[in-house]
Amino acid sequence: MNISELFAHKKTVYSLEVFPPKKTGSVDTVFNTLYGLRGLPVDFISVTYGAGGSEQQRGKTAEIASLIKKEYGIEPLSHLTCVGSTKDEIAKTLDLLKSIGVTNILALRGDMPVDGNAMMAFDHASDLTKFIKDYDPSFNVAGACYPECHVDAANLDEDIENLKKKVDAGVTHLTTQLFFDNEIFYEFRDKVEKAGISVPITAGIMPIVKKAQVERTVAMCGASIPTKFARLISKFADSEEALYDAGISYAVDQISDLVANDVRGVHLYTMNNVDMAKRITAATESMIKSANKL
Ligand code: FAD
């Protein structure tokens, strides 16, 4: 199924993200994650793509996406990056995805390696989107967006101008970078609408359930930390169990508020943590269901 049809029929779409194993990890980890997630009321599951990984590692994305579709009957969204591939390799990946029935792609630029040396099929996700749509218009293409501005953009207005190029190239829905302050999301949504972008925007929610995650995540994406969230972290930082519960509870609060404010989609970054994904899904399922009945 084309994921854009899901957005056409549902007011609030609920999705999860899983990732293939890193260099040293076993692929069984993600297979176990997917087995643990079976039966959850999700509309689609996205699979990340290691821009800096080997060809073999990157091939895992398609394998996992295929499993999600065939074994669990859920629509997969396969991530694909400009970084780390040539145009020919991208074309081969598209052929592979088509042959295994994966037709939804999240087109990304990818993060540049620290030394700045990387093969780059295209400069931007908008170019990749155009390439995919020209190669085979039956692919449905999604894109990423940044409520707190992408690090390379001079300011949010410029970033939104560039976002429009991506949507004009054929992107049918957008997923946000993680954020902890819903007000920032609402302001971003308003600005994007004013800029003439009308595709659905899904809120990317990353529950922070471990102390090590706090600094790493914020350093990587520069998300603002609201006072309420900072208090929670500092209060429970020394209790692994309490921080885990507090992180889940904060994510549930964020999702409830987003659903009450007519968000078009919630995308949970599961970090392959089945217990966390199950608890958050159970706590928000009735609200999402109710929003879809209204
Ligand atoms: P782009 O849309 O190309 O934007 C990058 C920068 O270029 C921005 O500053 C933008 O303003 C500017 N820009 C965009 N288009 C143009 C244009 N046409 N002309 C001039 N400037 C332009 N990374 C991975 O490696 N693998 C993944 O699986 C992965 N999944 C992700 C999922 C989500 C939901 C998100 C939010 C990010 C993900 N990332 C992933 C990270 C992503 O690759 C990085 O954030 C990357 O730095 C930007 O990717 P993009 O697709 O948003 O880039």
Image: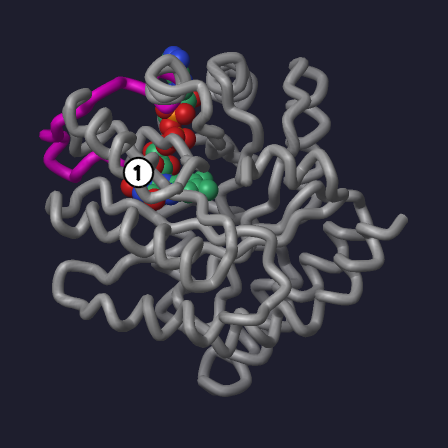
Q: Which residue is at a point 47% across and 63% down the rendered structure image?
A: 72
Which percent across, then down, holds residue 262?
Answer: 79, 43
Q: Main secondary structure of the magenta part?
A: loop
Figure check: 198 above or below 255: above
Which percent across, then down, holds residue 220?
Answer: 35, 48
| Colour mapping used in the image | one colour
Q: Nearer the viewer, residue 35 or 81?
A: 35
44 to the left or right of 62: right
Q: Is mark 1 within 8 Å of ligand 1?
A: no
- Residue indicated by mark 1: 99
Q: What type is the residue that disc 1 sits on? A: Ser
Q: Nearer the viewer, residue 122 or 41?
A: 41
Most extreme residue toward the right is 294
Image quarter for ligand 1 equals top left
Which percent across, then down, holds residue 273?
Answer: 43, 72
Q: Which residue is at a point 53% across and 40% down the rendered structure image?
A: 176
Q: Which residues are magenta?
A: 111-127
Q: Is residue 114 magenta?
A: yes
Q: Is residue 90 magenta?
A: no
Q: Which residue is at a point 63% across and 68% down the rendered structure image?
A: 281
Figure check: 96 above or below 226: above
Q: Secondary structure at mark 1?
A: helix
Q: Quadrant of residue 205?
A: bottom right
Task: Give the total number of marks visible in the rendering.
Answer: 1
At label 1, counting other C-alpha atoms closer than 10 Å, the crowd grade (few under 14, some 14-19, many 20 or more) is few
Q: Quadrant of residue 248?
A: bottom right
Q: Nearer the viewer, residue 125 or 138?
A: 138
Which percent across, then down, holds residue 260?
Answer: 82, 51
Q: Which residue is at a point 74% across and 43% down the rendered structure image?
A: 10
